[in-house]
Amino acid sequence: MSEAEIDWDSLTFSLTQTDFMYIATCNLGGVWEPGKVLPYGKLEIDPAAGVLNYGQGIFEGMKAQRSAEGNVVLFRPEENARRFQRGADRLGMPPVPESIFIDAVEQMVAANNRWIPPTGRGALYIRPVLWGTGAIMGVAPAPSYTLCIFVTPVGPYFKGGLSCIDLLISDEFHRAAPGGSGGVKAIGNYAPGMMPSINAKKQGYAEVIYLDAEEHLYVEEVGAANFFCIKDNVIYTPELTGTILPGITRASLIDIARHKGYEVIEQKVSTELAMSADEAFCCGTAAVISPIGSITHGETEKVYQNRTVGKITRELYDTLVGINTETVEDTFGWMHKVNLDLTINHA
Ligand SMILES: *Cc1c(COP(=O)(O)O)cnc(C)c1O
């Protein structure tokens, strides 16, 4: 497929196969060496691989996009690299050095350059994964590990602008427990959310809101996105207690809001606070910001801003997207330009 044959406007958030993937391997107790770029294709894996039997794996999600300046840019990739290291550590895997991670991501972007959508029409979604691929029978760290990175072009999450979503608070299911793996992107955290999410969708909701597993009183996350609400011009978001994934979008929005002079409070956010707020939204790399139109908890439904996008939500969204597309000044030094002429280490 040549560049001209890609129908950019029909892209959604789904997998389109691209040309190249990146693979590096490391033994337990060993040292990571830079990997190789290979044609995208299937992997061979031992049925006794640690990741297949015991879920020893983590992932990341990031985006490269063509900015209004004509650059190909990544957003704070060092933060993804560091979170990937913390996740590896939590799951007993050898952390990938930041320099190898970033170099690998850049090579994937450069090698798959023709799959990066034109400015404003989407992004190249980058998916790094780290798996225990060595064979192991007992429940213990696998003897060897694979870092794989693949990419796929994705369309804008909301075509035709921001739209509000309806959410359902789950009283029955939890995403993460104290001391567990909720604070890292462990692959095993996501399958247990599928059934609650499908059930919520059957009832007409976009996603479920998970409460804390101890007291069932505090909002933790919206599916796999972080939660914010705004009341009397004060911005609230659940504090990072270990059960909440420390989103890079979340951290960036806190910085942007404080820089604009808003008070931002990181604390436990009760369902009462959330459902008495003026605006609410959730955020993450995929959608950036999804404004929340309503939240239902049992018999109670709270509608925000008559299901339109609130003023502060809009302001934060415009600023973050502006920084991402290099149309708003990058005062924080977040954007990372990719050198498309870098050396690609083909296998
Ligand atoms: C990835 C993820 C987020 C969002 O993190 P970003 O770094 O902003 O993309 C939020 N919650 C969960 C559970 C996630 O997996």
Image (cartoon, helix red, strand yellow):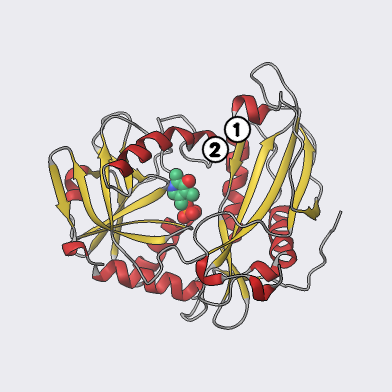
Task: Specify whether residue 306 is in view.
Answer: yes
> Residue 168, percent across and down?
26, 43
Q: Are marks 1 and 2 in contact (CB under 8 Å)?
A: yes
Residue 162's disc number: none
> Residue 265, percent across and down?
29, 55
For label 1, the crowd category at 10 Å Cα-Cα, with few meaning under 14, some 14 to 19 and many 20 or more, is some
Task: Specify whether residue 276 is in view.
Answer: no
Residue at 80 percent across and 53 percent down: it is 38
Q: Is 30 situated above or below 72?
A: above
Observer-nearest of 188 and 261: 188
Mark closer to the observer (1, 2): 2
Circle 2: element type? loop
Residue identifier under label 1 = 91
Residue at 56 percent across and 53 percent down: it is 61
> Residue 271, percent across and down?
21, 43
Observer-nearest of 259 and 290: 290
Q: Quadrant of residue 314?
A: bottom left
Query: Quick one: quadrant of the N terminus?
Result: bottom right
| Amino acid type, callout 1 | Leu
Residue that sits furthest to the bottom in the current view: 69
User: Across the whole image, how many numbered discs are drawn on residues?
Assistant: 2
Residue that sits furthest to the left in the current view: 299
Between disc 1 and disc 2, whose residue precedes? 1
| Amino acid type, callout 2 | Ala
Residue 186's disc number: 2
Circle 1: element type? loop
User: Could you give the CA–CA distance between mark 1 and mark 2, rounded to whole angstroms?
Assistant: 8 Å
> Residue 325, percent across and down?
51, 75
For label 2, the crowd category at 10 Å Cα-Cα, with few meaning under 14, some 14 to 19 and many 20 or more, is many
